[in-house]
Image (tube, grey):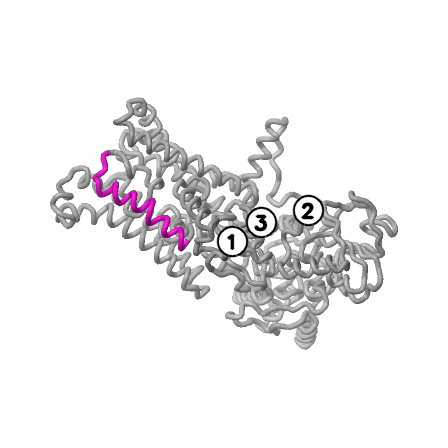
């Protein structure tokens, strides 16, 4: 039986996260909007397809490579194209009667390299391109330099790649395509794909091509964003700048405030009168060199900028702006490109963080598993419904309670997924920093959060390794759980200073929280979270595979204020518990507050909610939004940075290409790319950075590096973002 799936290019573009929840009424509408903003918070400007390790989408036989698949630079796009072709060549052809074995959609770096490699491996290949060969490079300004980064990785495939101008690269690639005899059809944009048993029917204009496999390599920039105002379709209004030298002694209007707009303005300003219209009050996302050159051009009178302005219409010879009319002979609307989200969805391709009924079901299952793990961990008689009275006994094995097996499970998961993460970020990328970071996390978990509290403490007491006096003190010998306080500092280890602790724990707890932790923060910022802490360790190991789903944006940064309330609550309850014997009025509220803190913070906010949300919002929900120790370290680090004592910061060089990989992979949702583009210092005064270094590791241009805080005036360090 033949199964047919019709896949058409869309007419209307939905939002980036899928179908919206339609809820009636203003109040419910507000709730729905707030709920949707939370669900959408992990999204980057362009959600990526969910792909297998071989770049196959959920539509079997349809592969995605290049910019759409997260290849931020030319060399990596070429590498993906070569790899997917070699993978497809090993697959069994779905139908040998098909005229083509492979249709590649898009004639850029990834698409051409895939097609050339596949053809060399004996496949019958067709390339479809709706505009021009290598159109992305053709759209670059004249003379733009193409980098062959990362330098540590060799080029793969038949296309030549070394540092060169765009013109040189385009000429060489076109020669390679001509010599190979590759079948490339220019001007044939794909309008529909029909998947059937045995392959695909790919419709491009009036023609339809039958193929066994499809590789989608269209990139993200094929659809220039438009203003949607009257006159925008006039023949002297463009959405790309191909050749600045063709314009001389003209009134030119540039609309936009990104690097493309600024670079176009600078290229035209030498021989024209240029005005930039930008909707914001300052340029916030342009490279440092562009900023410097723009300021020089403005000072010299070669460029005029109209801030806080938007175009309402392009009339004949005059553009209507909200701030007043601006004459123009040619106008360039350079406000970015619309990501092909609707197109991908029309193909049936599932996107990251796409909230469907199935995804909501998985969310419920994840929270139910987390609820069970932590609900039973409360102990006999205190379990959560429906485990009350039987759950603890049910999960007791070999005379060991669930609390022990929970620690075993926790350590095993951290080890298994930690090794995977170590391979991903350390060994695969030859990054010793990441290798040692994961060795540290796994080592601390095994020694201080498993072996010592579960085995070594008891053996030390029984063998009196710690001395007869301590071994015979019931407040010490019978409280193995307090050994977690060897590494977990107050207020994360909330019970350090009350509950009749031995003096050893009080002295060590005070020393750890108020001497050792501040010293660590002075030199390493908040790296405790990403090198030592068991809570952060689970997030960095099990949660690593979902790190790109960490909430992003200004709202998610504001949510971080919640940990200040938890920190304040922990401090107040600690004071009441310490003073309850001296101040009678403290006793009842202290006991009630302790119960609520244990229930709300120690159970729900540490365990059930964040662990259940790992696959949907990344691993740092607890660490980022509720952990009181993270807040205390943030306070220490802000003070050290404020007075420029801190030795922790991340600096950028001038090579940022705005690929967004650093921001995408930040577990605490920092817009790292913004700092890199402006070459601004990133530190713990302006961010909640935990020093995991993944942004440094993923950068294909080696832009970022750890360096001490510079001796710069605070106003130049910047505000929290």
- Could one spot residue 546 in this view of the protein? no
Q: Which mark is residue 645?
A: none
- In percent of width and height, residue 24 lies at 63, 28
- In percent of width and height, residue 713 lies at 54, 52
Is residue 509 a member of the stretch shown in magenta?
A: yes
Q: Which residues are magenta?
A: 500-524
* Mark 3 and mark 1: Cα distance apart in space: 20 Å
- In percent of width and height, residue 327 lies at 84, 52
Q: Which comes sooner in the sequence, label 3 or label 1?
A: 3
Mark 3 = which residue? 44
Residue 38 lies left or right of residue 420; in this view the side is: right
Mark 2 = which residue? 281
- Where disc 1 sits, the SS reads loop
- Where disc 3 sits, the SS reads loop
Question: Label 1 near label 2: C-beta < 8 Å?
Answer: no
Q: Quadrant of residue 297?
A: bottom right
Residue 375 lies left or right of residue 12; in this view the side is: left
* Mark 2 and mark 3: Cα distance apart in space: 23 Å
The relative height of residue 108 versus residue 375 in the rendered view (above or below) is below
* The furthest residue to the right: 316
Mark 3: give few (<14), some (14-19) or many (20+) Cα within 10 Å.
some
Q: Which mark is residue 682?
A: 1
Question: Label 3 near label 2: C-beta < 8 Å?
Answer: no
């Amino acid at each position: 039986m033949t199964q047919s799936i019709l896949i058409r290019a869309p007419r209307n573009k939905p939002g980036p996260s899928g179908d919206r929840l339609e809820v009636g009424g203003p109040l419910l509408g507000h709730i729905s909007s707030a709920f949707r903003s939370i669900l959408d918070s992990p999204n980057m400007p362009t959600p990526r397809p969910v792909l297998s390790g071989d770049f196959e989408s959920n539509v079997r036989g349809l592969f995605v490579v290049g910019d759409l698949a997260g290849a931020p630079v030319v060399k990596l796009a070429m590498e993906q194209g070569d790899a997917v072709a070699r993978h497809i060549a090993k697959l069994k052809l779905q139908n040998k009667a098909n005229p083509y074995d492979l249709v590649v959609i898009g004639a850029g770096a990834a698409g051409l390299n895939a097609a050339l490699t596949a053809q060399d491996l004996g496949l019958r290949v067709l390339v479809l391109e709706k505009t021009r060969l290598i159109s992305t490079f053709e759209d670059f300004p004249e003379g733009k330099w193409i980098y062959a980064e990362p330098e540590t990785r060799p080029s793969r495939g038949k296309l030549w790649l070394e540092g060169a101008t765009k013109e040189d690269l385009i000429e060489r690639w076109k020669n390679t395509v001509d010599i190979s005899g590759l079948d490339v059809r220019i001007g044939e944009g794909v309008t529909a794909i029909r998947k059937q048993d045995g392959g695909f029917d790919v419709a491009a204009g009036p023609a339809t091509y039958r193929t066994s496999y499809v590789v989608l390599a269209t990139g993200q920039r094929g659809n220039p964003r438009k203003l949607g105002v009257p006159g925008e379709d006039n023949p002297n209004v463009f959405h790309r700048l191909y050749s600045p030298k063709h314009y001389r002694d003209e009134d030119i209007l540039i609309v936009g405030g990104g690097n493309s707009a600024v670079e176009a303005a600078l290229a035209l300003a030498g021989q024209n009168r240029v005005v930039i219209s930008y909707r914001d009050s300052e340029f916030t996302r342009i490279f440092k060199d562009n900023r410097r050159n723009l300021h020089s051009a403005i000072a010299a009178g070669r460029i005029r900028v109209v801030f806080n302005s938007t175009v309402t219409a392009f009339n004949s010879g005059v553009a209507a702006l909200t701030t007043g009319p601006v004459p123009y002979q040619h106008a360039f609307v350079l406000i970015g490109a619309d990501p092909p989200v609707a197109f991908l969805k029309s193909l049936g391709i599932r996107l990251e963080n796409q909230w469907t009924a199935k995804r909501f079901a998985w969310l419920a299952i994840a929270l139910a598993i987390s609820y069970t793990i932590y609900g039973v961990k409360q102990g006999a008689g205190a379990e959560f419904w429906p485990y009350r009275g039987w759950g603890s006994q049910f999960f007791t094995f070999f005379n060991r309670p669930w609390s022990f097996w929970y620690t075993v499970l926790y350590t095993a998961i951290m080890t298994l997924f930690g090794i995977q993460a170590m391979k991903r970020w350390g060994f695969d990328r030859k990054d010793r920093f990441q290798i040692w970071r994961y060795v540290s996390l796994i080592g601390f978990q095994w020694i201080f959060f498993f072996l010592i509290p579960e085995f070594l403490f008891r053996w030390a007491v029984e063998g009196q390794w710690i001395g007869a006096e301590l071994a015979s003190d019931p407040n010490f010998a019978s409280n193995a759980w307090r050994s977690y306080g060897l590494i977990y500092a107050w207020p994360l280890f909330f019970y350090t200073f009350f509950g009749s602790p031995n003096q050893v724990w009080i002295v060590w707890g005070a020393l750890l929280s108020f001497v050792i932790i501040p010293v660590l923060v002075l030199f390493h910022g908040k790296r405790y979270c990403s090198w030592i802490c068991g809570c952060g360790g689970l997030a960095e190991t099990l949660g690593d595979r979902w790190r790109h789903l960490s909430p992003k944006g200004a709202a998610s940064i504001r949510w971080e204020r919640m940990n200040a309330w938890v920190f304040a609550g922990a401090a107040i309850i600690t004071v009441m518990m310490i003073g309850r014997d001296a101040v009678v009025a403290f006793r009842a509220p202290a006991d009630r507050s302790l119960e609520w803190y244990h229930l709300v913070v120690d159970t729900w906010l540490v365990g059930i909610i964040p662990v259940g949300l790992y696959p949907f919002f990344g691993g740092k929900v607890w660490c980022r939004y509720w952990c009181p120790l993270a807040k205390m370290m943030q306070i220490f680090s802000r003070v050290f940075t404020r007075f420029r004592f801190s030795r922790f910061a991340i600096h950028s060089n001038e090579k940022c290409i705005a690929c967004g990989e650093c921001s995408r992979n930040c577990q605490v949702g920092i817009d790292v790319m913004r700092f890199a583009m402006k070459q601004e210092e990133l530190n713990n005064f302006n961010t909640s950075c935990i020093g995991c270094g993944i942004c440094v590791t993923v950068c294909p241009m080696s832009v970022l590096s750890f360096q001490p805080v510079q001796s710069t005036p605070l106003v130049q360090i910047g505000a929290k973002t």
